[in-house]
Image (cartoon, rainbow, N blue to C red):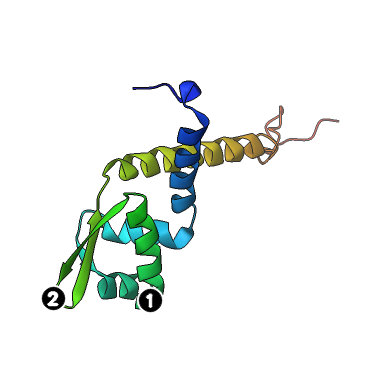
Amino acid sequence: MIAFDQLPAAALEQVASYFRALSEPMRLRILNIIGTDELSVGEIALRVDSSAANASRHLVQMAQHGLVARESRGNSVYYRIADPTVHELCDLVCGSIVRRYDQALNARAAFIEPPAAAPASASGGHKRR
């Protein structure tokens, strides 16, 4: 395998194009819905609350980048994940975001003072004179 820092400019453009295909939230929703299933465009559109035409447009984009595969059956077109590494990539990115979010929460928590405990009386509650 070629190291990332050894990729020629043309290959980097293809990598950027792949990530651009993943940069649309609707496409990520569609990938999430498909999961390990094979669904028709109509089923996908219904599950992502979109029109079939809009879902189809996104599916075509993802198919061009090898993310999904399509199969025509009669009047319907079915889609499935073509590249299972997309799940690994999403898990990696989501895990990184969760870690950064947790770190930010922990850093903010350091500035929140815990409630002060009531001072204990050394004399057991009796006043000294």
The residue lying at 43 percent from left, 45 percent from top is 18
- Looking at the rendered structure, the kind of residue marked 1 is Ala
The residue lying at 26 percent from left, 44 percent from top is 84
The percent coordinates of residue 57 (x first, y second) are 40, 68
Number of other residues with Cα within 10 Å of mark 2, as a class: few under 14, some 14 to 19, many 20 or more:
few
Please name whichever residue, 77 or 28, is drawn nearer the observer in this view of the structure. Answer: 77
The percent coordinates of residue 28 (x first, y second) are 41, 56
Find the residue positioned furthest to the right: 129
The residue lying at 18 percent from left, 78 percent from top is 75
The percent coordinates of residue 92 (x first, y second) are 40, 37
Residue at disc 1, secondary structure: helix
> Which residue is the site of mark 2?
74
For the C terminus, which image quadrant? top right
Q: How many marks?
A: 2
Is 94 positioned to the left or the right of 107 in the image? left
Q: Is residue 50 visible?
A: no
